[in-house]
Image (spheres, rainbow, N blue to C red):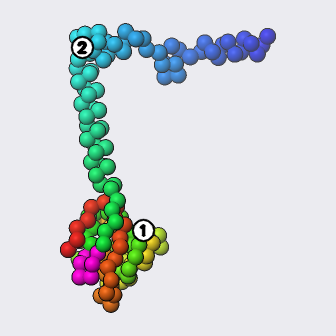
Amino acid sequence: MWSGSHLISQAVSDTPGSVDDPVVTKSYVDKLLGSGGGSGDSARKELQAMMDAFKKEMEANKAGTSSEVVIVKPGQTLMASAGAQFVLRAGKGVAYSSDVNGISNVTAGTDIKSGNAVPNNHLIIFPREGRGVMPDPDQTGPLTVLVLGGYELK
Protein backbone atom coordinates (compact mmCIF):
# COMPACT_ATOMS: atom_id res chain seq x y z
CA MET A 1 0.00 0.00 0.00
CA TRP A 2 2.76 2.43 0.97
CA SER A 3 4.77 1.82 -2.23
CA GLY A 4 1.73 2.47 -4.43
CA SER A 5 0.92 5.76 -2.73
CA HIS A 6 4.60 6.77 -2.84
CA LEU A 7 4.75 6.23 -6.62
CA ILE A 8 1.52 8.17 -7.16
CA SER A 9 2.76 11.11 -5.07
CA GLN A 10 6.02 11.26 -7.08
CA ALA A 11 4.17 11.05 -10.39
CA VAL A 12 1.99 14.07 -9.61
CA SER A 13 4.70 16.16 -7.91
CA ASP A 14 5.97 17.65 -11.19
CA THR A 15 4.22 20.90 -12.04
CA PRO A 16 2.82 20.89 -15.59
CA GLY A 17 4.75 23.35 -17.73
CA SER A 18 7.79 23.36 -15.42
CA VAL A 19 11.31 22.40 -16.45
CA ASP A 20 10.66 18.89 -15.18
CA ASP A 21 7.40 18.60 -17.16
CA PRO A 22 7.46 20.90 -20.20
CA VAL A 23 4.03 20.97 -21.80
CA VAL A 24 3.04 23.11 -24.75
CA THR A 25 -0.12 23.04 -26.80
CA LYS A 26 -0.45 22.89 -30.55
CA SER A 27 -2.18 26.28 -30.57
CA TYR A 28 0.82 27.82 -28.72
CA VAL A 29 3.27 26.39 -31.27
CA ASP A 30 1.05 27.49 -34.18
CA LYS A 31 0.84 30.99 -32.77
CA LEU A 32 4.60 31.10 -32.15
CA LEU A 33 5.40 29.98 -35.69
CA GLY A 34 2.87 32.24 -37.31
CA SER A 35 0.16 29.92 -38.59
CA GLY A 36 -2.10 31.48 -35.95
CA GLY A 37 -1.46 34.91 -37.51
CA GLY A 38 -0.19 38.19 -36.14
CA SER A 39 2.70 38.07 -33.71
CA GLY A 40 4.04 34.78 -35.10
CA ASP A 41 5.49 36.53 -38.16
CA SER A 42 8.28 38.11 -36.17
CA ALA A 43 9.02 34.80 -34.41
CA ARG A 44 9.16 33.01 -37.76
CA LYS A 45 11.48 35.65 -39.22
CA GLU A 46 13.71 35.47 -36.15
CA LEU A 47 13.82 31.67 -36.33
CA GLN A 48 14.63 31.81 -40.06
CA ALA A 49 17.40 34.36 -39.43
CA MET A 50 18.90 32.09 -36.76
CA MET A 51 18.76 29.10 -39.13
CA ASP A 52 20.37 31.12 -41.95
CA ALA A 53 23.17 32.29 -39.64
CA PHE A 54 23.73 28.71 -38.46
CA LYS A 55 23.92 27.43 -42.06
CA LYS A 56 26.40 30.19 -42.96
CA GLU A 57 28.58 29.33 -39.96
CA MET A 58 28.48 25.61 -40.85
CA GLU A 59 29.53 26.35 -44.44
CA ALA A 60 32.41 28.54 -43.22
CA ASN A 61 33.59 25.81 -40.86
CA LYS A 62 33.26 23.19 -43.58
CA ALA A 63 35.47 25.21 -45.93
CA GLY A 64 38.29 25.26 -43.40
CA THR A 65 38.26 21.51 -42.80
CA SER A 66 38.80 20.16 -46.28
CA SER A 67 41.81 17.88 -46.57
CA GLU A 68 43.98 17.63 -49.63
CA VAL A 69 47.08 15.74 -50.70
CA VAL A 70 49.70 18.28 -51.85
CA ILE A 71 52.94 17.58 -53.71
CA VAL A 72 55.70 20.03 -52.75
CA LYS A 73 58.50 20.04 -55.34
CA PRO A 74 62.13 20.88 -54.53
CA GLY A 75 62.49 24.65 -54.37
CA GLN A 76 58.88 25.14 -53.24
CA THR A 77 57.61 25.84 -49.73
CA LEU A 78 54.18 24.88 -48.47
CA MET A 79 53.05 27.93 -46.45
CA ALA A 80 50.22 27.13 -44.06
CA SER A 81 47.40 29.36 -42.89
CA ALA A 82 47.00 29.93 -39.16
CA GLY A 83 45.54 26.81 -37.55
CA ALA A 84 46.23 24.54 -40.52
CA GLN A 85 47.40 20.99 -39.90
CA PHE A 86 49.39 18.55 -41.95
CA VAL A 87 50.97 15.13 -41.99
CA LEU A 88 54.15 14.61 -44.03
CA ARG A 89 53.49 11.30 -45.77
CA ALA A 90 56.50 10.85 -48.09
CA GLY A 91 59.86 12.51 -48.61
CA LYS A 92 62.17 14.32 -46.23
CA GLY A 93 60.96 17.76 -45.14
CA VAL A 94 62.29 20.60 -43.04
CA ALA A 95 60.38 23.24 -41.12
CA TYR A 96 60.24 26.82 -42.33
CA SER A 97 59.42 29.80 -40.13
CA SER A 98 59.72 33.50 -40.87
CA ASP A 99 60.56 34.18 -37.20
CA VAL A 100 62.38 32.42 -34.33
CA ASN A 101 59.34 30.33 -33.38
CA GLY A 102 58.68 26.96 -34.95
CA ILE A 103 55.79 24.66 -35.73
CA SER A 104 54.03 22.32 -33.31
CA ASN A 105 54.62 18.58 -33.60
CA VAL A 106 51.53 17.37 -31.76
CA THR A 107 52.44 13.68 -32.07
CA ALA A 108 55.79 14.09 -30.29
CA GLY A 109 54.74 17.05 -28.15
CA THR A 110 57.64 19.19 -29.38
CA ASP A 111 58.32 22.41 -31.26
CA ILE A 112 60.20 22.09 -34.56
CA LYS A 113 62.44 25.09 -35.21
CA SER A 114 63.09 26.43 -38.72
CA GLY A 115 65.53 24.27 -40.68
CA ASN A 116 65.01 21.16 -38.53
CA ALA A 117 63.64 17.89 -39.91
CA VAL A 118 59.90 17.26 -39.90
CA PRO A 119 59.18 13.59 -39.12
CA ASN A 120 56.91 11.58 -41.40
CA ASN A 121 53.45 10.53 -40.17
CA HIS A 122 53.37 13.09 -37.32
CA LEU A 123 50.52 15.59 -36.91
CA ILE A 124 51.92 19.10 -37.33
CA ILE A 125 49.94 22.24 -36.44
CA PHE A 126 50.75 25.76 -37.63
CA PRO A 127 49.84 28.18 -34.82
CA ARG A 128 50.06 31.22 -37.10
CA GLU A 129 50.88 32.28 -40.65
CA GLY A 130 54.44 32.69 -41.92
CA ARG A 131 55.36 29.05 -41.32
CA GLY A 132 55.50 25.95 -43.45
CA VAL A 133 57.47 23.00 -44.70
CA MET A 134 59.80 22.47 -47.65
CA PRO A 135 61.75 19.56 -49.08
CA ASP A 136 65.11 18.91 -47.44
CA PRO A 137 67.74 20.74 -49.58
CA ASP A 138 69.82 17.52 -49.61
CA GLN A 139 66.92 15.61 -51.20
CA THR A 140 66.05 15.60 -54.90
CA GLY A 141 62.46 14.34 -54.68
CA PRO A 142 59.20 16.03 -53.75
CA LEU A 143 57.21 15.85 -50.51
CA THR A 144 53.75 14.34 -50.26
CA VAL A 145 51.80 16.18 -47.59
CA LEU A 146 48.24 15.67 -46.36
CA VAL A 147 46.98 19.18 -45.55
CA LEU A 148 43.93 20.06 -43.47
CA GLY A 149 43.07 23.76 -43.76
CA GLY A 150 44.42 26.63 -45.81
CA TYR A 151 47.81 26.73 -47.49
CA GLU A 152 49.78 28.29 -50.33
CA LEU A 153 52.68 26.94 -52.39
CA LYS A 154 55.52 29.43 -52.88
Q: Main secondary structure of the magenta part?
A: loop
Classify mark 1: residues with Cα within 10 Å, few (<14), some (14-19) or many (20+). Answer: some
Q: Which residue is mark 1?
A: 123
- At mark 1, the secondary structure is strand
Q: Which quadrant is home to the C terminus?
A: bottom left
* Left or right of 28 on screen, residue 79: left
Quarter holding residue 30: top left
Residue located at (33% from left, 56% from top): 66
- In space, the residues marked 1 and 2 are separated at their CA atoms by 53 Å
Residue 48: x and y in percent read 26, 28
Please indicate, yes or no, whether residue 101 appears anywhere in the rendered image: no
The verdict on residue 56 being magenta is no
Q: Nearer the viewer, mark 1 or mark 2?
A: 1
Residue located at (29% from left, 9% from top): 36
Residue located at (67% from left, 12% from top): 8
Residue 120: x and y in percent read 43, 76
For residue 66, which numbered disc appears in the image? none
Residue 22 to residue 109: above or below:
above
Reading the chain from its start, which is encountered first: label 1 or label 2? 2
> What segment is highlighted magenta in the picture?
72-77
The verdict on residue 75 being magenta is yes
Please indicate, yes or no, whether residue 27 appears anywhere in the rendered image: yes
Q: Which quadrant is home to the N terminus?
A: top right
Q: Nearer the viewer, residue 152 or 98?
A: 152
Residue 118 to residue 63: above or below:
below
- Looking at the rendered structure, the kind of residue marked 2 is Ser
Q: Nearer the viewer, residue 13 or 134?
A: 134
Q: Which residue is mark 2?
A: 39
Residue 82 to residue 6: above or below:
below
- Looking at the rendered structure, the kind of residue marked 1 is Leu
